[in-house]
Amino acid sequence: MGIFSSTKITDRHVQFINNFLPEELKVKDFNMEDIVHLRFRIKNFIDNLNSELRIKSQDLITLKEERLFDKFELFNVPLKGKSLGLVDVGIVERFSSKSTGNSFENGMVQYAIENTFEQVWAENNAQYTSVQKAKNQLKHKAMSIYPEANAIENFSITFRELGNSGNVFIYINGTATIADAIDAIEIDNEIKSLIERINTINDKIQNAQTKLKELPEYKELKSELKKL
């Protein structure tokens, strides 16, 4: 089939076009309409890959949280390793007993940080549950933003009562890190498979974006095809 009245598609034309296409879009034959829409086809291919990437990435986050969440630890001291970035969470909770902002901000909180909240606050379910909720949200956020992290260092938490309402603003933060002293978290085959697929998708996206940049404009492409 000719793309122009005087041009017949040959293997050279096909090879020329395929040089600008990702592997999945390579053709055995083409016509004028195909050439017009080549740029759209590559963009659509990239969009589909990005859509799959978002889904697979969320699946990975969910799996890691389900299977590795309890192994992801918080430390209130610096750790040797690679620091990745600050993560913080703020929530408002209502405690069963009245308090003052100062009592939360001073000695009791420092003591709690140094001796673990699990021990200090275990007798007060409302406060303990709220702290655990904040810590879990921090872990979820860290694992979502930095999937390669295995811990949080420089963990700290502060409280401030909002007026005299009993509502308390809890601010919790730390640095996601890859800690040297923590054994690598063993991951199962399903997680490994997802990671491999995500890496493959990323490679395909980069390749397709390169192809898109290299693809000549329609007039130039048509001119080059005529020369073959």
Image (cartoon, grey):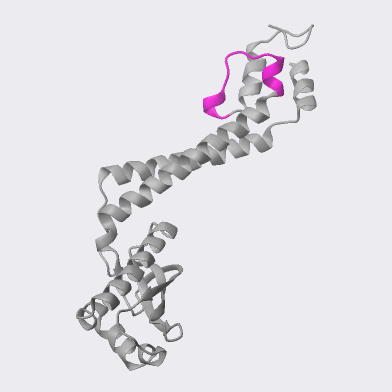
Residue 225 lies, with reference to residue 178, above or below; the image says above
Q: Assign the N terminus to one quadrant of the image.
A: top right
First to last magenta residue range: 22-36
Residue 39 lies, with reference to residue 15, above or below; the image says below
Residue 175 lies, with reference to residue 104, above or below; the image says above
At x 29% / y 89%, what residue is drawn? 111
Residue 181 image offset from top left, x and y in percent: 28, 70
Question: Would residue 161 be visible to someone looking at this image?
Answer: yes
76 within the magenta span: no
User: Hey, which quadrant is residue 176 in on the image?
Assistant: bottom left
**Image position of 118 (left or right of 7):** left
Residue 64 image offset from top left, x and y in percent: 32, 53
Total marks in image: 0
Residue 43 image offset from top left, x and y in percent: 62, 34
**Image position of 57 (left or right of 47):** left
Q: Assign the C terminus to one quadrant of the image.
A: top right
User: Hey, which quadrant is residue 222 in on the image?
Assistant: top right
At x 27% / y 57%, what residue is drawn? 68
**Image position of 155 (left or right of 6):** left
Question: Would residue 184 be visible to someone looking at this image?
Answer: no
Residue 214 image offset from top left, x and y in percent: 68, 35
At x 29% / y 71%, what residue is drawn? 132
At x 66% / y 22%, what residue is drawn? 16
